[in-house]
Image (cartoon, helix red, strand yellow):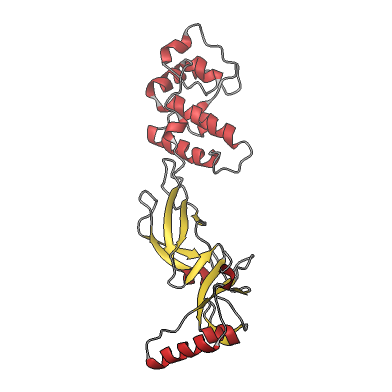
Amino acid sequence: MEYKDYYKILGVSRDVSKEDLKKAYRKLARKYHPDVSKEANAEAKFKEVGEAYEALKDPEKRAQYDQFGSNYQNGQSFNPPPGWGQQGGAGAGNFSSFFDNMFGGGGMGGGQENFYAPGEDVNAKITISLEDAFTGTKKTIRRPAGSKQAGTLNVKVPAGITSGKKIRLSGQGKVGMGDQSGDLYLEISIAPHAHYRLEDKNIFLDLPIAPWEAALGAKVTVPTLAGKINLKIPAGAKSGQKMRLKGRGLPGKEQGDQFVILQIMTPPADSDLAKQLYQQMAEELNFNPRETLENL
């Protein structure tokens, strides 16, 4: 099998200190880690670097490697004597046959995957108002515990975002052993509104109207998140009737609409005049709201 020059793989001299050896490994591990590296051979290089560090970080393994490997050069054939690998203890079965023959095959050792943790993603929630979802906003949040820096983060919330959507903040999660941080994912929650209801990107508003506005038709002022508009109520409108205001919902590539739900409100009979008017309507109007139910 081919001899592996672990010192050359890590780019260090044979008399490298333990601390400098660790620094060299961390630098290469960050460079070739498959989760972040754009190198074509990143995974193979990452395994090779991890194998080299596994061999040299342990004083006994390193002494064993130096004793037998001092006369070899990278690329030469390596043929260990019978029983050689038994003296080095368990190796890392996911490493090369050279490593296993040098130090003994077996189970997973304490190599690259235990030493190099790429960082942990963090999930959190942020609540905004419906007005903020419509216009977009900026929020200041506290950085999660375990991130590289303490303090706060300024987060830009885009206009038109809906509940359940997530904003990804790259590198703002928990930091790992290799100084690589995970990401922070902020899930958006839109707080309930006193008057509007939100369904996906559409906004719904119950609009109270008087009986005579419903019967005769009228022009009324309707609030929207973009400002007030005038709406024409058709004559003969019914309670529960839905009217669409195109493009008045949440903004975005697929613009939402606002739907106005007409709600006919009955004036209270709280004065003699009001009672007289209701009595006059009852006597003069030929109106039976239960006519369709009489034959049931």
Residue 14 in view here = no
Q: Is residue 260 left or right of residue 138?
A: right
How many numbered discs sit on the rendered protein? 0
Q: Is residue 188 above or below residue 292?
A: above
Quadrant of the image containing the N terminus = top right
Q: Residue at x 42, y 12 (%)?
A: 87
Q: Is residue 120 above or below residue 139?
A: above
Residue 73 in view here = yes
Q: Residue at x 53, y 25 (%)?
A: 5
Residue farthest to the bottom, as pictured: 273
Query: Quadrant location of residue 199?
Result: bottom right
Q: Residue at x 54, y 30 (%)?
A: 47
Query: Quadrant location of residue 243?
Result: bottom right
Q: Give the camera-side residue of 250 and 274.
A: 274
Q: Is residue 63 above or below residue 245?
A: above
Q: Is residue 133 left or right of residue 231?
A: left
Quadrant of the image containing the C terminus = bottom right
The location of residue 39, given as percent across then percent down, is 61, 41
Q: Give the camera-side residue of 149 and 224.
A: 224
The location of residue 101, given as percent across then percent down, is 51, 15
Residue farthest to the front, as pictured: 295
The location of residue 201, given as percent across then percent down, is 57, 65
Query: Quadrant location of residue 96?
Result: top right
Q: Give the camera-side residue of 255 and 139.
A: 255
The location of residue 232, given as percent across then percent down, is 61, 84
